[in-house]
Amino acid sequence: MLKDKIHKNLLEISQKFVRIRGRNVHKGSCGKVLVIAGSLDMIGAGILTSMACLKAGAGVVHFVTVRDVVPFISISYPELIVHGMESENGVLTHSCFDLIKSLFQKYSFDACAIGPGLTQCLSVSKLVHSLIGYLSERKCKTVIDADALTILSDLPADVLGTSENYVLTPHMGEFKRLYRSDLKIDFVDKNNRCDVAKQLAVSVNQVVLLKGPGTVVTDGNKSYINFTGNEGMATAGSGDVLTGIIASFLAQGLVSFEAACFGAYIHGLSGDKAFGINGIGLIASDILDEVPRSLKKLKDFHDNS
């Protein structure tokens, strides 16, 4: 049965994940993530992504965002290492590019997340163009989400390179902008979501996670349809939490397809727990709070099986 097969695959991935970390570890060996996100008016997106990285087990998270908000973040979220960058009208500019490269050279990040809350203005677009090229050169495992996905739709498909270093996490609107085909995707429904996601994954040679009920994860060959999650998760910031979870799993050693599948599952499982407590009034922070408990539940299962 399909659900039995999905459970089996997820159990294998989760078993691998819980065994990655031994007792003789330190924060630097548990995954270092760089999050490039946020703007003056949308700083919450970057905070949710960064905190989701930590809640999902990453050892260290660096957060690059506009300089104006650094004091607030540092006080309210002391676990994050925040790098304030030059901004123009409240958004990051291309002048940040060299500084971000220097952070990579200094800290050797294991994974990156880029996009939530960046906005799509010209200065941000130039920065994202340069960053994607640089990340491809470094072969850094990266989640591309939100505004960075929209900017990516203006770039040639081969800009992402030939190795599967990226996880693209579009919702349907972003998917339509990314998709380069004559297929009338206005008619995408639950019966062909997997097929069109696979076609995009093949086109860009990367892992694609198509959000929505029955989230689809595919590398163009293997596919997974997620079965956790609920209608209460249709709330602002929910996708930002998912981005952080996947980036965390990448940094901790899962390959792109595994991290995306396991991320979708844990995100939905945490949302189901939050929905049981808060109903349709749940907010993204409620999902965030449940992530460690979802991971513990799986670890306990494997420890006792």
Image (cartoon, rainbow, N blue to C red):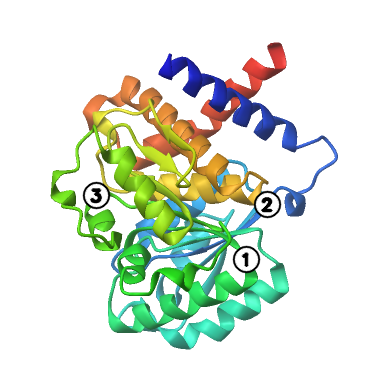
Q: Which residue is mark 3?
A: 172
Which numbered disc, 3 or 2, marks the residue that appears first in the sequence? 2
Quarter in which the N terminus is drawn: top left
Give the amino acid at mark 2. Answer: Gly
Q: Which mark is residue 12?
A: none
Which residue ends up furthest to the front in the rendered image?
182
Q: Nearer the viewer, residue 260 or 112?
A: 260
Which numbered disc, 1 or 3, marks the residue that appears first in the sequence? 1
Q: Which residue is mark 1?
A: 139
Q: Is residue 161 left or right of residue 102?
A: left
In this rendering, is residue 185 above or below 216? below
In this rendering, is residue 249 above or below 166? above
How far apart marks 1 and 3 lie (CA) works out to: 27 Å
Rendering coords of residue 146 (x, y %) = 33, 59
Give the amino acid at mark 3. Answer: Met
Which residue ends up furthest to the right in the rendered image?
24
> Label 3's element?
helix
Which residue ends up furthest to the bottom in the rendered image?
95
Which numbered disc, 2 or 1, marks the residue that appears first in the sequence? 2
Q: Nearer the viewer, residue 142 or 235?
A: 142
Q: Marks 3 and 2: CB-CB under 8 Å? A: no
> Label 2's element?
loop
Q: Nearer the viewer, residue 305 or 233?
A: 305
Quarter in which the C terminus is drawn: top right
Number of other residues with Cα within 10 Å of mark 1, as a class: few under 14, some 14 to 19, many 20 or more: some
How far apart marks 3 and 2 lie (CA) works out to: 30 Å
Q: Marks 2 and 1: CB-CB under 8 Å? A: no
Rendering coords of residue 46 (x, y %) = 42, 59
Rendering coords of residue 8 (x, y %) = 55, 20
Give the amino acid at mark 1. Answer: Lys
Q: Which residue is mark 2?
A: 31
